């Protein structure tokens, strides 16, 4: 079921059909704070001020879909922003490391970072739950990884993808039945890549015939 909320970063590139469900939508929104699209949108983590504005907006949406989520950091500084940027970059690297269609021919091996955090496990009438730990940016990090763990066990993590077009790399949630979507937007990213590949094949044939 598609949520009707509009995540501030992801809404610049996608409609609600491509929103990840629940708290996983926040992870997608974090990834989409980057400068993506054509024309390029601004990087929402370019400064402490813009990062604070995004955090406030994104957490307002998050609390609509997950009232138990931690509060947005209210003391973000330059060091905290550096940690948020590092988390965003590491997440993109991890999600890009093993695309569903397999590594492209001639691909260079990617060093996948290990993202770590702390979380509390509570056991109650509803079963076991992971709860974020820490304050400020560390709570954001803890919540983000909890959402990824939950999605992994729930079988939905494979649907959170990064566009296969290296000039895009936008994050999207693949709702296709067989989870086969690889492009952020097939009409732009897909066509661009297909045209580029076609021209490369023509160039290669031309070189081969000239030999």
Image (cartoon, helix red, strand yellow):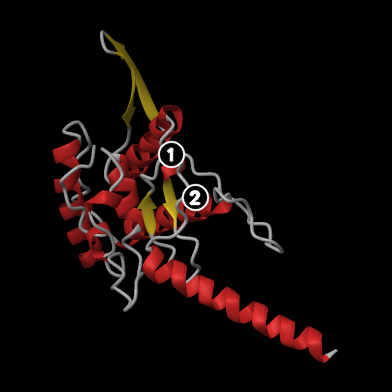
Q: CA distance from mark 2 to mark 1?
A: 9 Å
Image disc number at residue 108? none
**In this picture, is 177 found above or below 131?**
below
Residue 185 pos. (x, y %): 37, 63
- The residue at 29%/53% (across/down) is 29
**Side of 59 relative to 104 (left or right):** left
- The residue at 34%/47% (across/down) is 27
- The residue at 23%/42% (across/down) is 2
Q: How many marks?
A: 2
Q: Which residue is mark 2?
A: 95
Q: Which residue is mark 1?
A: 157
Q: Secondary structure at mark 1?
A: helix
- Residue 137 visible to the viewer: no
**Side of 41 relative to 183 (left or right):** left
**In this picture, is 167 found above or below 134?**
below
Q: Image quadrant for the N terminus?
A: top left
Residue 62 pos. (x, y %): 20, 43
- The residue at 32%/54% (across/down) is 30
Tell me the quarter of the picture where residue 163 sits: bottom left
Q: Secondary structure at mark 2?
A: helix
- Residue 26 visible to the viewer: yes
**In this picture, is 159 found above or below 89?**
above
């Amino acid at each position: 079921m598609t949520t009707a909320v509009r995540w501030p970063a992801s809404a610049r590139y996608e409609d609600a059909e491509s929103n990840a469900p629940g708290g996983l939508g926040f992870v997608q929104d974090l990834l989409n704070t980057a400068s993506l699209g054509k024309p390029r949108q601004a990087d929402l983590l370019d400064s402490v001020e813009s990062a604070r504005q995004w955090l406030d907006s994104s957490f307002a949406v998050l609390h609509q879909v997950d009232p138990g989520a931690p509060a947005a950091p209210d003391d973000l500084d330059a060091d905290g922003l550096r940690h948020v940027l590092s988390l965003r970059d590491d997440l993109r690297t991890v999600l890009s490391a093993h695309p569903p269609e397999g590594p492209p021919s001639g691909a260079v091996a990617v060093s996948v970072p290990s993202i770590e955090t702390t979380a509390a496990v509570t056991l109650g009438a509803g079963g076991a739950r992971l709860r974020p730990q820490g304050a400020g940016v560390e709570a954001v990090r803890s919540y983000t990884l909890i959402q990824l763990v939950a999605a992994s066990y729930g079988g939905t993590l494979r649907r959170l993808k990064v566009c296969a077009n290296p000039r895009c790399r936008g994050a999207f949630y693949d709702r296709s039945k067989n989870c086969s979507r690889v492009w952020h937007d097939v009409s732009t990213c897909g066509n661009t890549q297909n045209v580029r590949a076609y021209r490369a094949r023509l160039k290669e044939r031309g070189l081969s015939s000239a030999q």
